[in-house]
Structure formats: C-alpha cells, structure tokens
Amino acid sequence: MTEEQFTIHQAGINNHCPNCFAAKSLTFSFFQNQKENSWYIKTQAKVTDQLFCAQCQETIYPSAWDDGIERVFLYHQKLLMPNKAGYQLKKKALWAILIVTLVSIATGVWGWLTYGPQ
C-alpha cells in the first residue's frame, strides 16, 4: 500500500518572514493524503498545511506567525476546496465483485432448480 501526499492549494503571500524578514518569500501549501493499493484508492478527509520561506529555506510553524499571517491563512483556508474523502474502487475490485455476484446467483438458481419445489 502506497501513501501519497498531494497539494490541493498553494499560494504565495506578501507578508514578511518572521525568521529572516524577507518580503514576498512565504508560500502556504495545503496537502491531503491518499492511500492506494491494487484494489482501491482511499482519500482521507484530513488537510494539513505548511508555511515555507523560500529565502531562509525553513518551515514557519504557527507559534511564530503574526496577526497578518494568521489572517491570510484563514483567508486561504476558506478558499480551500479539498477532494471528497472516501473510497474509489479500481477495475480489479469491480470485476471481483461482479464475478462473486454472478457465481452466487448461479449457485442459488442451481440450488433452487435441484432442490426446489417438487
């Protein structure tokens, strides 16, 4: 089973970095996890976020955010359109379900014809 983290929203902001005070070097990224195996794909509802400074090459954690960064974060969080959480079956799983269903129906018909009303 592979787990993949993909970006669902990314935005550069004009605030100053709290570490190096560089302007226009911050980027908000929002991620969502997805687990995949040969039968299905599961998208998780949890959305994670990250604030990264391109100037000092560091992740800025929420404890270091000022009010301006917090307001921009809330704005971008409202814009966020995460993928719907749930399962998506692959062709292999759909074929397996179809075959099991057909075998069950055939077994039931055979049993009814063999041992049915006499």
Image (tube, rainbow, N blue to C red):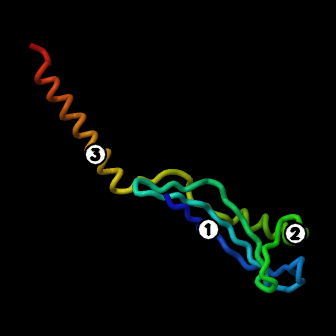
Q: Mark 3 points at which residue?
A: 98
**Place of residue 21 in the rendered image (x, y in percent of width and height, measured from the top left):** 90, 83
Q: Residue 48 carries which label?
A: none
Q: Earlier in the sequence, mark 3 or mark 1?
A: 1
- The label on residue 8 is 1
Amino acid type indicated by mark 2: Trp
SS for tag 3?
Answer: helix
Cα separation between marks 1 and 2: 22 Å
Can you give x and y, in whole percent of width and height, for residue 84 in the image? 56, 55
Q: In this view, does 92 lie to the left or right of 24?
A: left
Residue bearing mark 2: 65
- Say whether marks 1 and 2 touch (CB < 8 Å): no
Report crowding for label 3: few under 14, some 14 to 19, many 20 or more residues within 10 A (C-alpha): few
Q: What residue type is labelled 1?
A: Ile
| Three-letter code, disc 3 | Leu
Q: Earlier in the sequence, mark 3 or mark 2?
A: 2
At which x and y percent is residue 95? 29, 51
Query: 93 or 71: which is nearer to us?
Result: 93
Residue 48: give x, y in percent of width and height: 69, 62
Q: Which residue is drawn at 88% across and 64% down?
A: 63
Above or below 99: residue 66: below
Q: In this view, does 83 lie above or below 86?
A: below
Which residue: 89% across, 77% down?
A: 18
State yes or no: discs 3 and 1 in contact (Cβ < 8 Å): no
The extreme left residue here reads 118
Q: Distance between the residues labelled 3 and 2?
A: 53 Å
Determine the secondary structure under disc 1: strand
